[in-house]
Image (cartoon, rainbow, N blue to C red):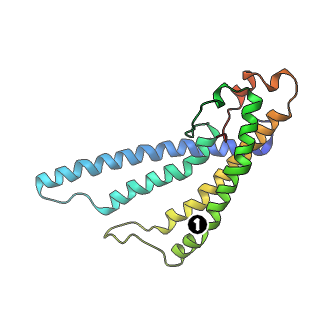
């Protein structure tokens, strides 16, 4: 854990959000199982037991897991990466890759997504956009999660950047050994 108050707070919030997301995943699986069971049961007994609400709720939960989980995946170094050389590098070299990746890709991309998605989200809220399907859910609250998710991703990206810069600032033998990497995983690398 970092000595920086910003990284401690952001990491704590991200970890709590990760725990919450695990419960969303359970809810999504249970709703998906319910949908599958009642669809076949309904055909068997001749009564429609499912609705678009349950189907959309399952999709919305998946969207929440995907969007809100991005910062947690970054913190836990769980993003998919093509790791040909990165894992073999010393901690300091990985920190350089992470800094470059965060500054040139992660943070600019996240800001870009916020910028281009804002008009669509604003329009969705203005008309209180809802599903076109009968019994469907409102869409405007889910679209607002895009803003929340990328703000959280930026916050976690800055936290990881601070940690990587801390690794680079260290001098002596601890900057290049793998003991330092156990306290800080490489996160924003390519």
Hey, which quadrant is residue 109 in on the image? bottom right
Which residue is under mark 1?
117
Image quadrant in which you'd find residue 42: bottom left
Residue at x 77% of width, y 46% of height = 6
Percent of width and height locating residue 23: 47, 44
Indicate the position of residue 37 as horizontal and vertical percent values: 23, 47
- Residue 74 falls left or right of residue 93: left
The relative height of residue 104 versus residue 174 in the rendered view (above or below) is below
Front residue (pair 116, 24) = 116
The quarter in which the N terminus is drawn is top right
Task: Tell me the residue at 78%/24% (across/down).
Answer: 176
Does residue 142 appear in this view? yes
User: Is residue 54 found left or right of 116 in the rendered image?
Assistant: left
Kindly give the residue lying farthest to the bottom in the view shown. 127
**In front of the other: 165 or 81:** 81
Q: Residue at x 56, y 60 (%)?
A: 146
Question: 42 or 176: which is nearer to us?
Answer: 176
- Which residue appears farthest toward the front when viewing the image? 84
Is residue 9 in view from this perspective?
no
Residue at position x 69%, y 56% in the image = 108
> Taking 148 as reference, is 158 above or below it?
above
Assign the C terminus to one quadrant of the image. top right
* Residue that sits furthest to the left in the current view: 45
Q: Position of residue 5 (x, y in %)?
A: 79, 43
* Horizontal side of residue 47 vs 30, given as left or right: left
């Amino acid at each position: 854990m970092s000595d920086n108050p910003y990284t401690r707070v952001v990491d704590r919030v991200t970890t709590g959000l990760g725990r919450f997301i695990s419960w969303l995943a359970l809810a999504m699986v249970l709703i998906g199982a319910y949908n599958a069971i009642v669809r076949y049961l309904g055909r068997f007994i001749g009564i429609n037991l499912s609705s678009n609400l349950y189907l959309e709720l399952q999709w919305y939960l998946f969207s929440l897991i995907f969007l809100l989980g991005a910062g947690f995946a970054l913190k836990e170094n769980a993003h998919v990466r093509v790791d040909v050389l990165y894992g073999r590098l010393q901690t300091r070299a990985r920190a350089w890759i992470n800094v470059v990746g965060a500054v040139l890709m992660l943070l600019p991309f996240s800001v870009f997504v916020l910028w281009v998605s804002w008009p669509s989200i604003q329009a969705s809220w203005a008309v209180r956009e809802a599903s076109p399907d009968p019994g469907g859910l409102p869409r405007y609250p889910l679209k607002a999660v895009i803003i929340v998710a990328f703000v959280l991703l930026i916050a976690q990206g800055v936290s990881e950047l601070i940690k990587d810069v801390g690794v680079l600032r260290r001098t002596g033998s601890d900057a290049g050994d793998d003991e330092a990497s156990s306290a800080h995983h490489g996160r924003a690398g390519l």
